[in-house]
Image (spheres, rainbow, N blue to C red):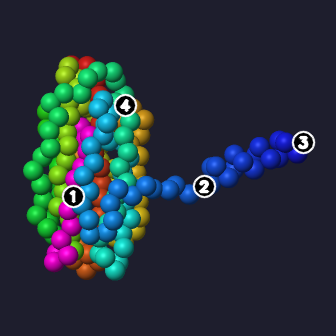
Amino acid sequence: MASTAFLLLVVLAMFFAPVYASWLNNYDKDVKFSCPSGQVLSYVASTHHNSYEDRRFDLRCRSPPVSGTLKQCFWTQYVNAFDEPVVYQCPHDGFLAGMRSYHSNDYEDRRYSFYCCRLPGYVTYECSYTGFVNQKDQTFYYSAPNGRVLKGMVSFHDDKTEDRSFQFDTCLIKKK
């Protein structure tokens, strides 16, 4: 009986344990992250600090939901100007495998660039946006649902809070 109660306590502790992020950057510093070969971006976490008016990021990867070799990978140019929206989707049935950004203290904002890859012979379909995953000045943790890949990101900057809200575009993948 005691061992059952202990096991239940351990399971409950694991279930209610907070999610911890492993931040890739310090505030006001660059982020440059690409997934290991053969993996795609699957998790994005970020936290905001009002004194720095900046965000830290944690990005993680997993194997795509179908087998194959990722090809035609490339870094985009920076897709937004400071204080302007980010509206980006990887082209040609591609999906995200990395992200980089840098911060400006003058604008208190970041510019973003993405690393996109494709799986030859496969297409993305039934894509949908998440809706905003955060409120301004708040931490968020987002994992793409199993079976889906991150195709893109939308983000809007707010001058009053000097922060951004984020949403993600996720898709299924199938053979052509």
Question: How busy is the neighbourhood of tag 3: few (under 14 within 10 Å), some, or many (20 plus)?
Answer: few
To which quarter of the image does residue 36 belong?
top left
Sequence-wise, which precedes: disc 3 or disc 4? 3
Mark 3 highlights which residue? 1
Q: CA distance from mark 2 to mark 1?
A: 30 Å
Q: CA distance from mark 4 to mark 1?
A: 24 Å
> How many residues crowd mark 4 within 10 Å: few (<14), some (14–19), many (20+)?
some
Q: Nearer the viewer, residue 159 or 126?
A: 159
Secondary structure of the residue carrying numbered label 3: loop
Rounded to the nearest angstrom, the CA distance separating label 3 from label 4 is: 41 Å
The answer to which of marks 4 and 1 sits earlier in the sequence is 4
The span from disc 4 to disc 2 (Cα, nearest Å) is 25 Å
Q: Which mark is residue 101?
A: 1
| Residue 102 counted in the magenta span | yes
* Secondary structure predominantly adopted by residues drawn in magenta: strand
User: For the residue marked with disc 4, what is the amino acid?
Assistant: Ser
Q: Is residue 13 left or right of residue 55?
A: right
Q: Residue at x 14, y 67 (%)?
A: 82
Q: Which residues are magenta?
A: 94-107
Image quadrant occupied by the C terminus? top left
Q: Which mark is residue 63?
A: 4
Name the residue rendered at 37%, 54% in the picture. Answer: 58
Disc 3 and disc 1: Cα gap in Å? 53 Å
SS state under label 2: loop
| Amino acid at pointer 3 | Met
Q: Residue at x 41, y 40 (%)?
A: 145
Residue denoted by label 2: 17
Q: How many marks?
A: 4
Circle 1 Cα neighbour tier, 10 Å, few/some/many (<14 / 14–19 / ≥20): some
Q: Earlier in the sequence, mark 2 or mark 1?
A: 2
Q: Can you give x and y, in whole percent of width and height, for residue 164 in the image?
A: 27, 66
